[in-house]
Amino acid sequence: MEKCHTTYCIQNIQNANVINYTTLFTKIRYLRGIGFFMETHYIKYYEFPIGWLKITTNNSHLIAVSFSDEEGESSEDLAPVLIDTFTQLTEYFEGTRKSFQIKLAPEGTDFQHKIWELVEKVPFGETASYLDIALQSGSEKNTRAVGLANGKNPIPIIIPCHRIIGTNGKLTGYAGGLDKKRWLLLHEQKHSTRQNLLF
């Protein structure tokens, strides 16, 4: 999973009014050894069985997937990675895809990236506890920090933070709501070889 570095939004001010670009916007990105360069983002809303999802990419990587109550305005042009993300998510919801092959670029701290990489390893149809991930990250004392990092995951479903549950099997907070977390777990149970409830 590739890391994104700090980004700075461009605000376009004309006649004292800020122009808001809701569908296609540009960021200035700084990378060591390269310097500043412009990065274009693409947005598309798709409706899946779980509701509306907003997909955000740059030209080559998936940046974010977020839950939405309704359809928003989408970019006129779409990057191939965005179309591929839609295709793979469609296959996931159909039950024919159990892992994703998409280049990811979520923004976060080094620790968050470490946790997200561990969460990515939890297989389809299985769950892990926050304590499990904390121990894998180096210390059981990281349990609370794991929960916070999981809650900041900008690419749910693909980085499957819904598969992380309490040590006692209890479902805990989820960006899309516990109803969506339960739906995703039951969906994976239905399409996996596991026979027992995950939680």
Image (tube, grey):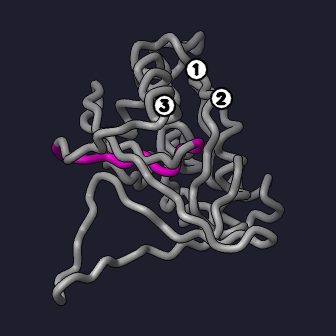
Q: Residue 64: say if magenta.
A: yes
Precedes in sequence: disc 3 or disc 1: 3
Query: In terms of image quadrants, where is residue 140?
Result: bottom right
Residue closest to the eye, 151 or 51: 51
Instruction: Determine whether 146 is above or below 69 in the image.
Output: below
Question: Of marks 3 and 2, which one's residue comes earlier in the chain?
Answer: 3
Structural crowding at the residue carrying mark 1, measured as other residues with C-alpha within 10 Å and reported as few (<14), some (14–19) or many (≥20): some
For the stretch drawn in magenta, what is the main secondary structure? strand
Quote the CA–CA distance across marks 1 and 2: 8 Å
What residue sits 51% from the left and 50% below the top? 63
Query: Mark 3 and mark 1: span between their CA atoms?
Result: 14 Å
N-terminal of the two: label 1 or label 2? Answer: 1
User: Can you identify the residue that label 2 sits on?
Assistant: 123
* Residue topped by disc 1: 98
Residue at 83% x, 62% y: name it: 138
Please tell me which residue is depicted at 53% across the width and 37% down the height of the picture: 158
Q: Of the residues shown, which amino acid type is indicated by label 2?
A: Pro
Please name whichever residue, 74 or 51, is drawn nearer the observer in this view of the structure.
74
* Numbered range of the magenta stretch: 60-70
Q: Is residue 19 above or below residue 103?
A: below
Kind of residue indicated by mark 1? Lys
- Callout 3: 10 Å neighbours few (<14), some, many (20+)? many
The residue sitting at the bottom extreme is 16
Residue at 18% x, 41% y is: 71
Q: Residues within 10 Å of mark 2 (few under 14, many from 20)?
A: some
The label shown at residue 85 is 3
Q: Nearer the viewer, mark 3 or mark 1?
A: 3
